[in-house]
């Protein structure tokens, strides 16, 4: 868990308190002016009401230029960012015709497939000509092509599971599957930092939900033992089934799941394991097969494997892989399969082609080179950031590396200063993270060159000094060490 320094926590609380107080003060006078002016609601209550509305109006709008920046090119190592301006204190933003060529440190383009690729792109174009952009139908009607069947077989083989089912949206893969698999009388035990799609899916299932401390197998075992002993609420009957849900790489922390220990505990207590590999599949492991390959876990020990195609494969959608019985059941019971339009054929072809490149089935070794490059880039960038004194979360080999900002004033300052120097970063704050734990999330790609990463480090270092987010002492450089040694002699 993140141990925030006492002084940092105090100043962060003070900053949010000040913003909250001034926001309430302005809202008080707003009510007075609204009462004096004509009211067009005619008895209707405000449709936007509550703390969320207050947060958007009084906090988010002040810095909304740091979020949702439109781009005008493929999300490659460098991309074009559309410049915007505001004439009403950031309440509305208007686009201009000007573009800024920026180094991309925000997209999930882990293996570089989001840009034009010599193997994937021609095949995607041919698929577009043959099938059109959409099937305009659900999978159970006229929306299943030979590409969809090939894709499901390709995914199952890639993750080493008997069968797989694919969906057109990654978020829906979690939020629509969990209510089908779990229900009343079932128990879901979820990591405290699981993605919102898992949280909403678990809530919609009607199952009882318990949370264990982030990435702590010992606490997971405590929760499992306690819940098995107590049974269902009120009746104390045994649970119909228990499912433990974890992520391969946690998207806001960049940490690898302690999967071997969690698998051992689930086996001990006869609980199913649900693994979300949205950020790990394709990005880690010797052949890109995710955390199971990286950590030496047999995929047969993971009951349900989930992943998305929006990161390493440069496409859209998600998948569930498991036993043939599980996949067959989902095809008959999952609303996302029965009622949603099937994944776009060109998108399906992009996934198939990218997997073939990763496995070397395109006749080249570009896939192995990409996997080696993303690993080298990630470990180099993380190491250099830590040497500079930044507080960087996550583990080695993870392409996701959050830099802690904490104070709300440092969120826009860091983002805007980096953009001025043509480095595009993503900043994340409440409600995506806890109130005190705002951060900048860096995503590294295999398409980044050493020169790109060096430039990014130089800019981030300068901005870090300016904003004041180097919370640890920097390591002395080799030149400084040599100079000191000479002076000492």
Image (cartoon, grey):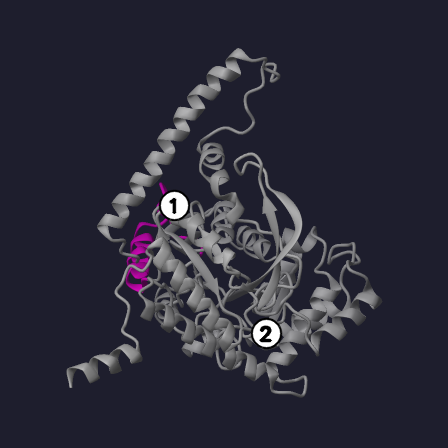
> Can residue 49 be spotted in the picture?
yes
Q: Which mark is residue 337?
A: none
Let me know if residue 221 is in the magenta part: yes
Vertical relation: 48 (above or below) 357: above
Of residues 263 and 81, the one nearer the viewer is: 81
| Label 2–label 1 contact, CB within 8 A | no
Q: In the image, what residue occupies the spot 39% across and 73% down?
A: 396
Of residues 474 and 448, the one nearer the viewer is: 474
Q: Position of residue 427 (x, y in %)?
A: 46, 53
Q: Where is residue 437 in the image (x, y as percent from the top left)?
A: 36, 51
Q: In the image, what residue occupies the spot 69% across and 70% down?
A: 350
- Determine crowd level at label 2: few under 14, some 14-19, many 20+ residues with C-alpha closer than 10 A: some
> Can residue 243 be spotted in the picture?
no
Q: Position of residue 234 (x, y in %)?
A: 35, 41
Q: Quadrant of the N terminus?
A: bottom left
Q: Residue 409 carries which label?
A: 1
Q: Quadrant of the C terminus?
A: bottom left
What residue range appears in magenta? 216-241
Count the labels in the image. Answer: 2
* Front disc: 2 or 1: 1
Q: Which of marks 2 and 1 is nearer the N terminus?
A: 2
- For this orientation, the residue located farthest to the right is 130
Q: Where is residue 124 in the image (x, y as percent from the top left)?
A: 75, 70
Vertical relation: 163 (above or below) 174: below
Q: Is mark 1 on a helix, strand or loop?
A: loop
Q: In the image, what residue occupies the spot 31% across and 44% down?
A: 12
- C-alpha gap between disc 2 and disc 1: 50 Å
Using residue 42 as the reference point, say whether residue 276 is left or right of it: left
Using residue 424 as the reference point, say whether residue 349 is left or right of it: right
- The residue indicated by pointer 2 is 162
């Amino acid at each position: 868990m993140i141990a925030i320094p006492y002084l940092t926590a105090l100043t962060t609380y003070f900053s949010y308190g000040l913003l909250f107080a001034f926001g309430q003060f302005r809202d008080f006078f707003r009510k007075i002016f609204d009462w004096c002016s004509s009211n067009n609601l005619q008895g209707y209550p405000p449709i936007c009401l509550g703390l969320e509305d207050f947060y958007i109006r009084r906090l988010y709008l002040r810095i909304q230029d740091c979020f949702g920046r439109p781009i005008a090119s493929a999300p490659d190592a460098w991309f074009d960012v559309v410049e915007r301006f505001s004439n009403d204190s950031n309440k509305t933003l208007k686009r201009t015709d000007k573009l800024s060529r920026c180094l991309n440190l925000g997209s999930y383009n882990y293996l570089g497939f989001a840009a034009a690729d010599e193997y994937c792109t021609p095949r995607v174009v041919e698929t577009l000509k043959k099938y059109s952009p959409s099937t305009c139908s659900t999978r159970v009607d006229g929306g299943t092509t030979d590409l969809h069947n090939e894709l499901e077989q390709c995914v199952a083989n890639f993750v080493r599971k008997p069968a797989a089912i694919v969906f057109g949206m990654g978020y829906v893969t979690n939020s629509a599957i969990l209510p089908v698999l779990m229900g009343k009388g079932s128990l879901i035990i979820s990591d405290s930092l699981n993605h919102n799609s898992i949280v909403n899916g678990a809530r919609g299932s009607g199952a009882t939900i318990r949370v264990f401390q982030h990435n702590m197998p010992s606490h997971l075992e405590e929760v499992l033992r306690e819940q098995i002993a107590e049974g269902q609420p009120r009746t104390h009957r045994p649970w119909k089934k228990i499912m433990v849900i974890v992520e391969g790489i946690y998207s806001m922390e960049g940490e690898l799941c302690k999967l071997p220990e969690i698998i051992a505990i689930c086996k001990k207590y006869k609980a199913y394991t649900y693994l979300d590999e949205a950020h790990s599949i394709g990005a880690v492991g010797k052949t890109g097969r995710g955390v199971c390959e990286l950590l030496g876990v047999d995929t047969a020990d993971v009951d349900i494997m989930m992943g998305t195609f929006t990161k390493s494969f440069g496409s859209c959608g998600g998948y569930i892989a498991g036993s043939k019985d599980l996949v067959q059941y989902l095809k008959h019971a999952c609303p996302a399969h029965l009622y949603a339009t099937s994944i776009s054929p060109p998108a399906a072809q992009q996934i198939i082609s990218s997997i073939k490149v990763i496995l070397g089935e395109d006749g080249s070794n570009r896939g192995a080179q990409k996997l080696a490059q993303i690993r080298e880039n990630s470990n180099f960038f993380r190491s250099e950031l830590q040497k500079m004194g930044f507080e960087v979360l996550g583990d080695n080999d993870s392409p996701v590396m959050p830099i802690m900002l904490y104070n709300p004033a440092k969120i826009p300052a860091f983002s805007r200063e980096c953009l001025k120097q043509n480095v595009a970063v993503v900043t994340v704050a409440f409600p995506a993270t806890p109130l005190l734990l705002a951060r900048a999330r860096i995503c590294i790609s295999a398409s980044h060159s050493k020169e790109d990463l060096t430039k990014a480090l130089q800019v981030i270092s300068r901005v870090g000094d300016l904003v004041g987010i180097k919370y640890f002492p920097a390591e002395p450089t080799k030149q400084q060490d040599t100079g000191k040694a000479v002076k000492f002699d």
